[in-house]
Amino acid sequence: MNGQVKRANGMVLQGPKPRIFNQLNKFSARWVAELLAILWSLRMTPSRATSYTPFFMVYGSEAILSTDLDYGAPRIRVYDKQGTKASLEDAMDQLDEARDVALLCSAKYQ
């Protein structure tokens, strides 16, 4: 497990380097402001091993971005408040299946 933690920490540390490296001495605390964007991008990037995003594996659906709301993405337009409970139950069933598939893909990848 320590190898996985080191890899994840390395990915987090690689994020701010291109954004603040040239101005590191000038803005030494700028990395704090960049950290949330870096973590968000890591959570939204599909894993090579599982082909799912970490956000999906935790919450059972992909995140809705603010641009999706602004420009009316298809999944925003088809949202039906009446069928929310039924679709949530379906999503939970799909999440269990997706986690099983991700486990198999991860084992095959390793």
Image (cartoon, rainbow, N blue to C red):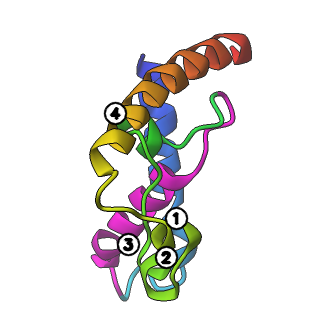
Instruction: Please check the rendered image and state whether residue 30 is part of the magenta-colored stretch, yes or no.
Output: yes
What amino acid type should be assigned to the residue bearing mark 4? Glu
- The stretch of residues the image draws in magenta is 27-49
Towards the viewer: 101 or 92: 92
Image coords of residue 47 (percent x, y): 61, 38
Q: Which mark is residue 34?
A: 3
Cα separation, mark 2 vs mark 3, equals 22 Å
Is the C-beta separation of discs 2 and 3 under 8 Å?
no
> In the picture, residue 9 is in which quadrant?
top left
Q: Which residue is mark 1?
A: 75
Helix, strand or loop for disc 4: helix
- Quadrant where the N terminus sits is top left
Cα separation, mark 4 vs mark 3, equals 36 Å
Res. 59 in view: no
Of all residues, the one furthest to the front in this rendering is 82
What amino acid type should be assigned to the residue bearing mark 2? Asp
Helix, strand or loop for disc 1: helix
Residue at 42% across, 25% down? 93
> In the picture, residue 25 is in which quadrant?
bottom left
Is the C-beta separation of discs 2 and 1 under 8 Å?
yes
Location of residue 16 with respect to 83 vertically, above or below: below
Residue at 49% across, 66% down? 78
Is the C-beta separation of discs 1 and 4 under 8 Å?
no
Res. 17 in view: yes
What amino acid type should be assigned to the residue bearing mark 3? Glu
Q: Which mark is residue 91?
A: none
